[in-house]
Every structure is written in structure tokens, then in C-alpha cells.
Image (cartoon, rainbow, N blue to C red):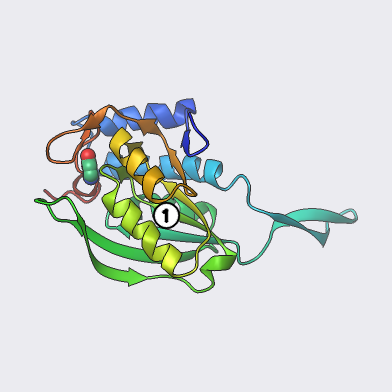
Amino acid sequence: MSAHLTIVTHPLVQHKLTIMREKTTSTAKFRQLLREISMLLAYEVTRDLPLAQTTIDTPLCPMQAPKLEGRKLALVSILRAGNGLLDGILELVPAARVGFVGLYRDETTLQPVQYYCKLPAELEERLVIVVDPMLATGNSSAAAVDLVKQSGARNIIFLCLLAAPEGVARMKEAHPDVRVVTAALDERLNEKGYILPGLGDAGDRLYGTR
Ligand code: URA
């Protein structure tokens, strides 16, 4: 594994991911598992957030204790499946600023088309975590990272559930400074740009559409 790619091998993550991959897993269960996994992945991607010492009073005495420094985190969800990862992370870090990027994939060219972009202010001062469950061709992911960089972001992590080697390579080529964190690196893409063995269409499985 390179510094560019981190695979979170924690047994709880791997177990939950296996259940999500199974085609018989219901929408409700899929959504619940994605929420749970996103909290575990959030633990990994926030481990270097800076802390500042602050004075507090315990019931017994004053003490110096660490707290997260303010204005440190922004989450950017790539619509719509990114919202499945976003919800769980926000439970752990409710004060995070949140942005949304709307990109759909042209099914013929597999190229991303932007239809929405709303990002928080002062991205240059924050760790920006861009979330999308599936890093497939990497075209949408690279385009989303382009947008957050254009808004000033310098410290960016791309967080996904599953990655294809093609997507990891595309991200490394387009954004060598952006670390990719994922629960699994799968085998390859099929001719329609789906990850194999994968879990199907993450948005459809999350929201019960087809
Ligand atoms: N998007 C998905 O939802 N699934 C894939 O396998 C690839 C892209």
C-alpha cells in the first residue's frame, strides 16, 4: 500500500462490507451498514486532526485537556450516494461544515457532468474530506476534487467504501497530493464502469431506486 492509498482493514469494517455486497441485503440494512461503516472510516480519516489544550473543571479540580481546534473540518459529499457516507460521519463530527457536489456520469462517455456545487467558506483552513462510496473510473472523484481545490482547499482526503484500481490510478495521476482512504480495493471495472466484484449501484442500493 502506498502513502496515496489507505485500506482500512479493521474486522468490523470488513464484516459489514461483506454484508453490503450481498445482493440479498435489503435497502434498510444497506443504509444502516453504510452509516455504521462511515463512522468507523471517519475514525481513521480524522486521526490527525489537530488538538488544542483548554482549561476545564472536573468535579474535583481544574485541568488542561485536549479539544479539537475550531474551524478544522469540512465534508464534501458527491451526490447522491455520498450522502450515505456523510450521515454517519456527521454523527461523530456534528460541527463539521458540509458541501455538496452534484455530478452525474454520462453513461456513454463515462465522463462527469456537473449540475450542482455548494461549498463551505474558508476551505484553505480546513481538512476537506470528499466522500463518495464508489471510486470507479475516478473521473467524477477527480472532478469533485478539482472543484474543492478551485475553492481554496489544500488539505484533502478522498474517502470511499470501495475502490477500483483504475480509479485509484486516475486520482493519483490527477491529484497526487490527495490521500485515498477506502475499505477495499476491488479487482477491476466492467465495460459499463461498474466495480467488480463490487456491490452494484451504491445510490440505488442506498435509496431503493433502480
Ligand atoms: N458507481 C456505483 O454505484 N457502483 C459502481 O460499481 C461504480 C460506480
The residue positioned farthest toward the left in the image shown:
108
Ligand 1 lies under 8 Å from the Cβ of mark 1: no
The residue wearing badge 1 is 130
Residue 34, x across and y down, in percent = 36, 43
The amino acid pointed to by label 1 is: Val
Quarter holding ligand 1: top left
Q: Is residue 143 above or below residue 14?
A: below
Residue 73, x across and y down, in percent = 55, 60
Q: Residue at x 53, y 52 (%)?
A: 92
Q: Residue at x 19, y 31 (%)?
A: 23
Q: Secondary structure at mark 1?
A: strand
The residue positioned farthest toward the bottom in the image shown:
121
The quarter of the displayed image where residue 137 is located: top left
Neighbor class of circle 1 (other Cα within 10 Å; few <14, some 14-19, many 20+) is: many
Residue 154, x across and y down, in percent = 53, 60
Left/right of residue 126 with respect to residue 147 in the rendered view: right
